[in-house]
Image: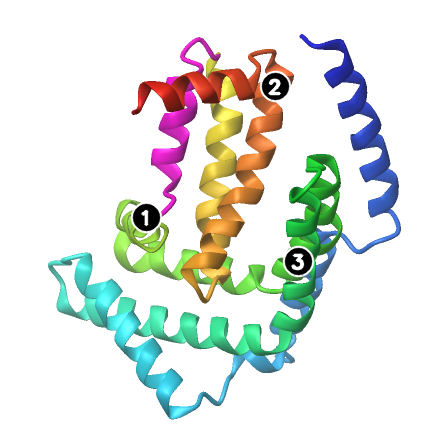
Amino acid sequence: MNYFFRISSFVFFMALSLSTLQAETAAVVAARTQAAVDRDDPPKWWTPDLPEAIQRDVDSKGKRLAGQLVLSDESKTQKTAELMTEHYGRVWAWHQQADGKLDAAWAAWDAARGGQKDELKALAIMAEQIDPIYAEFTPQIQGLLVALREQIGGEKTIELLDRITRSPGAERTYNAYVAMVPEMTDEEKAILWNRMAQAREDSLAAWTDGRIIKIFKKYKIRNEFSIDYFGYGYRNRYEAWAKSQR
């Protein structure tokens, strides 16, 4: 394994650990939002008053997503549509209050990854800025997933998530990693897959397809670092895989 990468990774993660002591972690933010919901004092976006055009949009999206599942029970289709309509109403409302700070955080992330790319700085921005902002919405995502699994089961819930995140796609991205490095151990593969599964869930906070891509990308960067840390050399493996796909 590359010695410099070991040292730089150690320095980065030590710095990240120290810096996050000064910032609210994603877990703390999510817990605070959940506590507010539990005491019947949820944030405003939890019970939004949507403009008519947005209400039509989320109604249509909920019905479309539920219909694509081709459920045998019409009542479950209707309930799934209601859950997704409610969810995307909250997504829209949350973005109205969060987009100022979220846009700034993503801009900082883009700047770190542009020009003289500094992926370590980008990872720090993820942990200290982007992740805590999205954590405000975590209770809604987790509540939705519980409700969906109760209504339509785990398999159909995953099918729904895969439809929402079809590009870039959790399984497609993971399969590319395995094709790049087929000799990875099961434990190493599990680390990469768990991040892709998390990206798929986190993408439920996105209002646009562009933000789904960004959410996946922040997990893909972590996976790229992991492949390096495992000792396989991500960049060379990626270039060889990309060449084979032409």
> Regarding mark 3 in the picture, which secondary structure is present there?
helix
Q: Is residue 6 among what the camera can see?
A: yes
Identify the amino acid type marked 3. Ala
Mark 2: few/some/many CA within 10 Å (<14, 14-19, 20+):
some
The residue beneath circle 1 is 166
Location of the N terminus by quadrant is: top right
Residue 71: within the magenta?
A: no
Sequence-wise first label, 1 or 3: 3
Mark 3: few/some/many CA within 10 Å (<14, 14-19, 20+):
few
State whether residue 210 is above or below residue 120: below
Q: Nearer the viewer, mark 1 or mark 3?
A: 3
Residue 124 occupies which quadrant of the picture?
top right
Q: Kindly identify the residue that appears in the image at 29 percent across and 71 percent down.
A: 61
Q: Kindly identify the residue that appears in the image at 57 percent across and 28 percent down.
A: 224
Numbered circle sitting on residue 134: none
Q: What is the C-alpha distance between the residues marked 1 and 3? A: 25 Å
Q: What is the C-alpha distance between the residues marked 3 and 2? A: 26 Å
Mark 1–mark 2 CB contact (< 8 Å): no
Sequence-wise first label, 3 or 2: 3
Q: Which residues are magenta?
A: 166-184
The residue beneath circle 3 is 107
Identify the amino acid type marked 2. Asp
Numbered circle sitting on residue 228: 2
Location of the C terminus by quadrant is: top left
> Regarding mark 2 in the picture, which secondary structure is present there?
helix
Sequence-wise first label, 1 or 2: 1
Position in image of residue 235 (x %, y %):
55, 21
Identify the amino acid type marked 1. Arg
Q: What is the C-alpha distance between the residues marked 1 and 2? A: 27 Å
134 left or right, relative to 57: right
Q: Nearer the viewer, mark 3 or mark 2?
A: 3
Q: Is residue 76 among what the camera can see?
A: no
